[in-house]
Image (cartoon, rainbow, N blue to C red):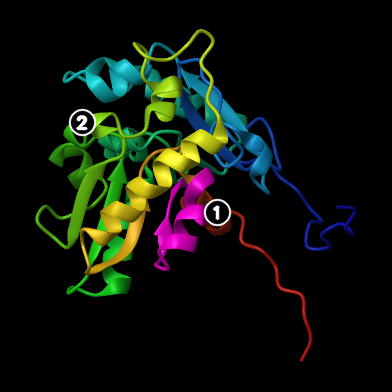
Amino acid sequence: MYRNRDIGINYIKARKDHRCYGMGLGIIILDDVYPGFPGDVRNASAYPFPIQYEIAEGVDIQALVRKEDKSPCLQPIQRAAKRLEKMGCRAIAAECGYFAYFQKEIAGYTDVPVFMSSLLQVPLAQQIIGPDKVVGLLVAREDKMTQAHLEAVGIQPGSNYVITGAEDDGRCPEFEHLWYEPKRPDPPGAYYDKAEKEFVPVAVDFYRAHPNMGAMMLECTGMQPFARAIQREIDIPIFSWGTLLDYAYSVVVHRDYYGHV
C-alpha cells in the first residue's frame, strides 16, 4: 500500500478538459436503487483500482432492458459519459450488459475508451476456443437480448455462440428480489447463499446442454460474484464484467514490471 513514488512521474501537465487525476474507470450506473454483492459492478469495494460512478438519470432497468423504444435513454447516458470523462476517468464502462445497445453511440461520443457491455468479450472468446466450439451467453433475460445488442458489440449473428436467460421461467427468484420491480421487496435485498444455490445450477445446466461449449460469458453485472463457484463446477474459461473491467483498466493504465534476470 505504501509504495515508493513512481520516479517516472516528474513533470506533470493537464489532460484535455480533465479536472481530476489518478482516476481509474468511470462507471455509468442505472438510476435504480438496489444493492450489489462484492464483485458486482455497483459495489466498488472488490476492485483494485479507482472507480467513479455517474448515474444515467431517468434510465432504470425498465427503460434500458424491458422497453422496446430505448431512444430516450441515449441522451442521459451521453451526459453521464461526458461527466465521467470531464472528471478525468481513464475509460468508461457501464453496469449492465444491456448497455451494449449504445456501445457505438457512446464510443463515438467521448475521447476515452468505452466498454459499455461485458458482451464485448464474446468475439475474443470465440476466437480463443476455435470455430468448432461455442461461447455460452448467460444473460438475464433471453427475450430482451436482441440482435441489435449483439451486433453493436461486434458479435456476428449466427456465429459460434448459444444463449439462455438465467431469470427465464423464474429460475433465479433471488435475483428478481434485486432487479425485477414487481417482485422485489422494499427496500430491495437478497441473500448470497440463496442466489448462489439458484444461479450456479442454471449455469451448469446450460453448459451440460451444449457439450461443445468452450467458454461462458456472464452478461449481467450481478453474476460475477458467483463466477468462481461456476468455474469450480465447469472447468472452462468464464468471462464476466469483472474480467472486462480488469482488462479495461490494464489497457489505459498499463502496469510497470519489476523483477530480475
Amino acid residing under circle 1: Asp
- Quadrant in the rendering for residue 39: top right
Whether residue 238 is visible to the viewer of this picture, yes or no, is yes
Q: Quadrant of the C terminus?
A: bottom right
Q: Could you tell me residue 162's position as x and y percent?
A: 19, 54
**Furthest-left residue in view?**
158
Identify the disc placed on residue 233. none
Q: Could you tell me residue 233's position as x and y percent?
A: 44, 61
Range of magenta residues: 225-241
46 lies above or below 155: above
For the residue carrying disc 2, how many other residues have a C-alpha within 10 Å: few (<14), some (14-19), or many (20+)? some
Q: Which residue is mark 2?
A: 144
Q: Could you tell me residue 52's position as x and y percent?
A: 61, 32
Q: Are marks 1 and 2 in contact (CB under 8 Å)?
A: no
Q: Nearer the viewer, mark 1 or mark 2?
A: 2
Which residue corresponds to the image point at 29% horizontal and 53% vertical from the top-left?
A: 205
For the residue carrying disc 1, how many other residues have a C-alpha within 10 Å: few (<14), some (14-19), or many (20+)? some
- Quadrant in the rendering for residue 191: top right
Q: Which residue is mark 1?
A: 246
Q: Secondary structure at mark 2?
A: helix
